Structure formats: structure tokens, C-alpha cells
Amino acid sequence: MTSSNQALFEKSQQLIPGGVNSPVRAFRSVGGTPIFFKKGLGSKLWDVDGKEYIDYINSWGPMIVGHAHPDVIGAVQAVAANSLSFGAPTGLELEMAVLINKLVPSMEQVRLVSSGTEATMSAIRVARGFTGRNKLVKFEGCYHGHSDALLVKAGSGLLTFGEPSSAGVPAEVAAHTLTLEYNNTQQLKDLFAKAGDEIACVIIEPVVGNMNLVVPHMEFLQTLRDLCTQHGAVLIFDEVMTGFRVHLGGAQALYGIKPDMTTLGKVIGGGLPVGAFGGRKDIMQCLAPLGAVYQAGTLSGNPVAVTAGLETLKLIQAPEFHAKLTAKTKKLVDGLVAAAKEAGVVFSAQSVGGMFGLYFSEQCPTSFAEVMQTNKENFNQFFHSMLDAGIYLGPSAFEAGFVSAAHTDDDIEFTLAAAKKAFSAIAAQ
């Protein structure tokens, strides 16, 4: 008997490329049929067949207080009744700006957009306008949205300009992007010694969530900050994923390193499309209508989306919110490591705040190259075993996971019980 998921996916592939509106949803990495969902509440999701899952994707991060939180839903319904959009200023935008400025150490001024991709693309443009330079530095395995200049892989050598990693990206655009190895402090020093005064900006995920979870070495982050200051390059922390999730003030507050600019998304929309970029006032003053750097968006600061974000940000300021979320996530990770060890399966895991990474390798990876050495076949078997048991993990060995405040001890115990069976099945191969 064909499931509703299978029927919907077959129909979707006729009208939507690959049947999905974002590639990882297609399950190409793990195989099988994507799950089509119809409801979420707290830590749980229900698919179109009515099957229940414990959700460890959390819409890739935004649902930090859980699905359909009554405060968020109630506020959104009240604002939506007044109109869905104005294309004009509202007081809600100012309220969001005040709150971001209060919580995020680097923020002096901020502009709202509608996605993380818009935020990173715009921040880079502002940095180039501010410095009058063209060269952009990014790191292998970090993902900053799908704008042309960021879909670039490393060249054949340290000072070789990047090559497009996607069709449709002109080589001339990629030529301005340099890609370095994450956590490689010596590469940073070598590059800045050779071309530091030509670099407009460096963009980085201060904690990586897009090649699975990779944690930075403190020496690496501090060296990056020092070199950007020394050479006048703009340091951009892409905190679209880490913002408000690893710490109330983001990774920059957790590690005590202040970037020049920050990009935000996910949590600040509470599940609706909101992004933001901001930072030092002297840099942000380059934006139109004050300066020569142009950026605009019809739905920027949309009142319904901003309301969802505001209510979420209010909730996560509760006393001990992040301490409890961190402890809950660590309990999950430690339990998984213990279960794998008991079964004799090579496995490691780690967490930062409400983010976690699972790896079928002896040690937690620290770079893209190390991530690529993990056992993807074992991950795929583990993923499907957990999915069958009602545990919804990211459908790729290269994605971080997320815990919400709504996850209970019972959720974690249920997850660990399912994991023990999954690890045992892997060990029995």
C-alpha cells in the first residue's frame, strides 16, 4: 500500500524540481522517500499518514521554543488580523532592532531582510563598499546561502582564486573568492601575509552547522580577529544558525570575540522568513539611503514574521533558558556516545548550546576533510533505523541537529532507547 508521503512525492516531482523546494529535503543523501508533514506541536511532528516523530531538525534551527508555542502563535494571529504586509515602516521593526542591539555584542545598527542568504549577500556587499576592496575569504564546508560569490570551492593552491561549485556561477565572480581550510591557523597567517591588504572581508560560521557540527579552535578564531583588524578587513560572523541558539548573544558572546558584522536568521523569525545583518555603525552607514551601497526588499521587516521572531526572542530570555537547553542537548549527546560504545560501534558526538553533531568516526571532526572521512553508510543505516522508530534527524551526514526547550527527558530517553537498537543493528553487520 502506497503511503501518502510516497504519493505526494511522486506528484511533486512532476511539478517541482526533484520534488522539493530545498535540496536536502529530497533524501538523496540517505535514500528513501521524504516525509511530508502536516502538524508540529512542542517537540513532536506528525506526517501526512499520521505517524508521530520526535523532531531534532526544528526547521533547521528556528523552533528553539518548540513547534506552535502558544505565545508565538497568539501574537502572530493578532498581528495578522491587521494585515499581512504594508511595505512601509512599523514599530515592530524598531522593537526588533532594539532587541538585537541589546543581545548581540557586535550590533550597533541592523537592517532586516527576509532570509539568511539575503543577509550574507548584503553584508558582503556592504563590506566591499566600505573597504573599496573586492576579495572575499570563506572557509571550506561553511555554507552562507546560495548567492553566486559564495558557491565557490577552493582552488588548487592557497593563493589560487576559487572555482564555482555550482553551474550558473560565472568564473569571473568566483575569481574574487578565496576558500581556506576551517581551523587552519597557519593558512590564515600565510594568506594575510601575502594579500591581507587586498581582502575586503572574511565570512565564517563561528560554529559550523553546515558540514555537520564543527567547533572552532579558539586560537583560530582569535587569529582571524587579529588579522582582520591589522589589515582593515571586515570580519563577518554568519550567525544565521548559531545566533541565539548556542548562547543568548550568539557564538560571539560565547567565545568573547566580536566581529565587525553579523548575519542572523532562523531564530529571529521564530519559524517565519526573517534575516538580518548589521554591526559597526560606520560600516552600516554605507547603506542606502545614507550611503552608496544599495539594498532593498519589499517584505523586509514584514510585521507577521517579525512578530514571530520577537515573541521567540522574548521567550529565550527567560532565566537559565540556555543553560537548561545546553544541559538537555549534552544529555542526548552523552547518551548516544555511551550507547554506541556499548554496542561496539565507532561513533562520536558533541554539542554547543542547542546544536549537536553525530559522526561515525573515532573523533569529532575539526575540518571539512575530516568530516568527509566519516562513515556515511553507517550514518544512513542509523538515520533510517531512527526514522522508523519515530526519530526525525537531518537526512544527511553533513547536517547539525537541534534540540528545543520543548524536548522532555522522556523524549531523550525514547531517543536513546531507539539508538541502542540502531547501533546494535549496525554492529551486527
Image (spheres, rainbow, N blue to C red):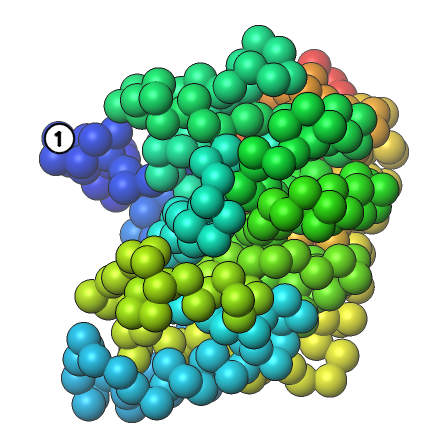
Q: Position of residue 171 (x, y in %)?
A: 35, 18
**Residue 6 in the image: x percent, y percent?**
27, 35
Q: Where in the figure is residue 264, as x and y percent of width and height?
A: 50, 60
At x 47%, y 79%, the residue is 97
For the point 57% across and 26% down, the residue is 179
User: Which quarter of the rendering shows the N terminus?
Assistant: top left
Q: Residue furthest top?
A: 156
* Classed neighbour count for the residue bearing mark 1: other residues with Cα under 10 Å, few (<14), some (14–19), many (≥20): few
Image side of residue 376 versus residue 67, left or right: right
Amino acid at dot 1: Gln
The residue depicted at 34 percent of the width and 89 percent of the height is: 91
Residue 352 appears in the picture as rendered: yes
Q: Nearer the viewer, residue 198 or 148?
A: 198
Asked if residue 6 is positioned above or below residue 156 in the image, the reply reads below
Q: Which residue is mark 1?
A: 14
Residue 414 visible? The answer is no
The answer to whether residue 336 is left or right of residue 18 is right
Decide if residue 342 is on the left or right side of residue 31. right
- Which quadrant holds residue 194? top right
* Residue 315 falls left or right of residue 77: right
Q: Nearer the viewer, residue 203 or 239?
A: 203
